[in-house]
């Protein structure tokens, strides 16, 4: 699993989009239109970008590798929409 964790403005989004494209994967995000615009600006328009609705309603190829853009935003949306919970924290381990 690829974990990209760096400060804001250091190219994480572009790196994730490029990794998804190289793996013929799908990118799940909470802001589909915004990320599609960024992908276009980065010259990576062919990467498949989906949002929560695409995932829930089966409008994506689940056999492809999944990459998540801004995991915290996606998880906040999921917990609130499905359970009415406000996600306030989480931990994550990075591989050394």
Image (cartoon, grey):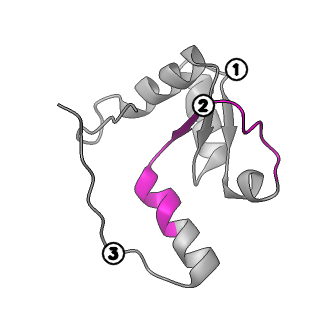
Measured along the vertical axis of the image, is residue 81 above or below residue 35?
A: below
Residue 12 in which image quadrant: top left
Number of the front mark, 2 or 1: 2
Q: The magenta stretch spans which residues?
A: 58-76
Question: Which residue is labeled 3 in the image?
Answer: 88
User: Would you say residue 70 is visible in this rendering?
Assistant: yes
3D distance between C-alphas at marks 2 and 1? 15 Å
SS assignment at label 3: loop
Residue 77 colored in magenta in the image = no
Measured along the vertical axis of the image, is residue 30 above or below residue 24?
A: below
Dot 3 or dot 2, earlier in sequence: 2
3D distance between C-alphas at marks 1 and 3? 34 Å
Across and down, in percent, residue 84 comes to 56, 85
Dot 1 or dot 3, earlier in sequence: 1
Across and down, in percent, residue 73 comes to 47, 59
Q: Residues within 10 Å of mark 1 (few under 14, many from 20)?
A: few
User: Would you say residue 43 is visible in this rendering?
Assistant: no
Numbered circle sitting on residue 46: 1
Q: Is residue 91 left or right of residue 51?
A: left
Q: Is residue 79 left or right of residue 95?
A: right
Q: Residues within 10 Å of mark 2 (few under 14, many from 20)?
A: few
Q: Residue at 67% x, 45% y: name it.
A: 33
SS assignment at label 2: loop
Observer-nearest residue: 55 or 41? 55
Dot 2 or dot 1, earlier in sequence: 1
The outermost residue toward the bottom is 84
Counting labels gives 3
Question: Which residue is labeled 2 in the image?
Answer: 65
Across and down, in percent, residue 74 comes to 52, 58
Q: Residue at 27% x, 39% y: name it.
A: 5
Measured along the vertical axis of the image, is residue 76 above or below residue 62?
A: below
Q: Residue at 30% x, 36% y: name it.
A: 9
């Amino acid at each position: 699993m690829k974990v990209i964790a760096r400060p804001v403005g250091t190219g994480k989004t572009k790196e994730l989009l490029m990794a998804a494209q190289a793996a013929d994967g799908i990118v799940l995000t909470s802001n589909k239109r915004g990320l599609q615009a960024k992908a276009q600006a980065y010259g990576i328009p062919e990467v498949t970008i989906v949002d929560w609705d695409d995932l829930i309603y089966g409008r994506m190829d689940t056999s492809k590798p999944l990459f998540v853009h801004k995991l915290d935003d996606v998880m906040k949306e999921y917990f609130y929409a499905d359970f009415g919970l406000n996600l306030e924290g989480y931990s994550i381990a990075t591989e050394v």
